[in-house]
Amino acid sequence: MIKLENISKSFISKKSKIDALTNVSLEVKRGEIFGVIGYSGAGKSTLIRCVNLLEKPTNGKVYVDNIELTTLSSRKLLASRRKIGMIFQGFNLLKTATVFENIAIPLRLTGVSKKEINARVDKYLDIVGILDKKDAYPSQLSGGQKQRVAIARALSNEPSVLLSDEATSALDPDTTEAILDLLLKINKELGITILLITHEMQVIQRICDRVAVMEKGEIVEQGLTKDVFTSPKHPTTQKFVNSIFNHNLTPELLQSLGGTGEIVSLKFLGHSSKEPALALVSKKFDVYPNILSGNITQLKEEPFGSLLVHIKGEHAEVQKAIQYLKEQHVQVEGASNHVNSNKRIS
């Protein structure tokens, strides 16, 4: 559905040249939700604006629905953009226009009939859950309601692709959850492919099928969300994952654990997160598991948990316990590090 081939983008001023993107390639499949995550300055905003050519790439090719946008005339590009909806962090609503007019005006400019405009405005305001706010002005709406108007406006052209540029970063946690639920609904019920950028790992884990991690204008890691979560390879990816599962051990705690056993990081995905594998360890082997910290979170379709555990016991028994956990499809990391040498495992 969306394909970027070796996209580079440079900004040139009188004093310097800034390479915002360098040979970025990715492919978003039809019907999926694909997330791009990175810290400020990573190039993700430039990347998403290259998809609909709000920023024209310096080099590379952009395909949307098998059409190479970078070769189109201005007129044909305008027509293709109508099938690419976009929502922004700042909502971009007309303050002096009602909710109805904020959605209707762009449709009028593209020649949609009055009857069809009325039908589409009602349809998409109903989908986003604020049909009762049709005659209100933006100043009368909450942040979440404004974003719902922006989403309805993006949907009113009935696009096949929806781009989300940090659409939840200005919202409180509860409102963010509601907007993410709405994006999931749009993806599932309308079949719209969604490409979103964010700096929040919670957004990725909540709704994305696949994810790409950006740093300094390049993609440093990409794959299925569950694979990236369970086995992050690049330091930047590890930092994002650790922002959710952050296991810190103080020297005082380490000292209190004694000198025997292992400190291990256990990761449970899907079915394995529901099994009492850790509880069974103490019954099957002469060891005493002590949970030091942990959390269970929900990926899009399955639970994922991470625990930092001190398995106390003689070396041979500890190794048997660790092997048993692996056989139960629990990921075990840090098993070679003894208590005295452990300071942090995430």
Image (cartoon, helix red, strand yellow):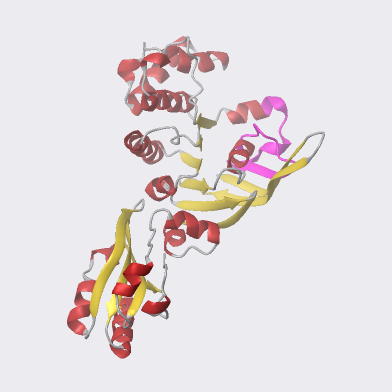
Instruction: Judge whether residue 72 is colored magenta.
Output: yes
Instruction: Judge whether residue 36 is colored magenta.
Output: no
- The residue lying at 37 percent from left, 28 percent from top is 144
- The residue lying at 51 percent from left, 57 percent from top is 237
Question: Which quarter of the rendered picture does the N terminus lie within?
Answer: top right
Residue 36 locus on image (x, y percent): 53, 47
Residue 259 locus on image (x, y percent): 33, 82
In this view, the residue farthest toward the left is 283
The residue closer to the viewer here, 242 or 28, is 242
Q: Is residue 154 above or below residue 302?
A: above
The residue closer to the viewer here, 154 or 311, is 311
Asked whether the viewer can see residue 223, the reply is: no
- The residue lying at 36 percent from left, 73 percent from top is 264
In this view, the residue farthest toward the right is 14
The residue closer to the viewer here, 310 or 240, is 310
Q: Is residue 249 above or below residue 171?
A: below
Asked whether the viewer can see residue 124, the reply is: yes
Q: Quadrant of residue 229?
A: bottom left
Residue 269 locus on image (x, y percent): 33, 63
Count of picture labels = 0
Question: Which quarter of the rendered picture does the C terminus lie within?
Answer: bottom left
Q: Quadrant of residue 345?
A: bottom left
Q: Is residue 301 left or right of residue 59?
A: left
Q: Which region is colored magenta?
A: 51-76
Q: Is residue 156 left or right of residue 278?
A: right
Residue 49 locus on image (x, y percent): 61, 36
Q: Is residue 218 above or below residue 318?
A: above
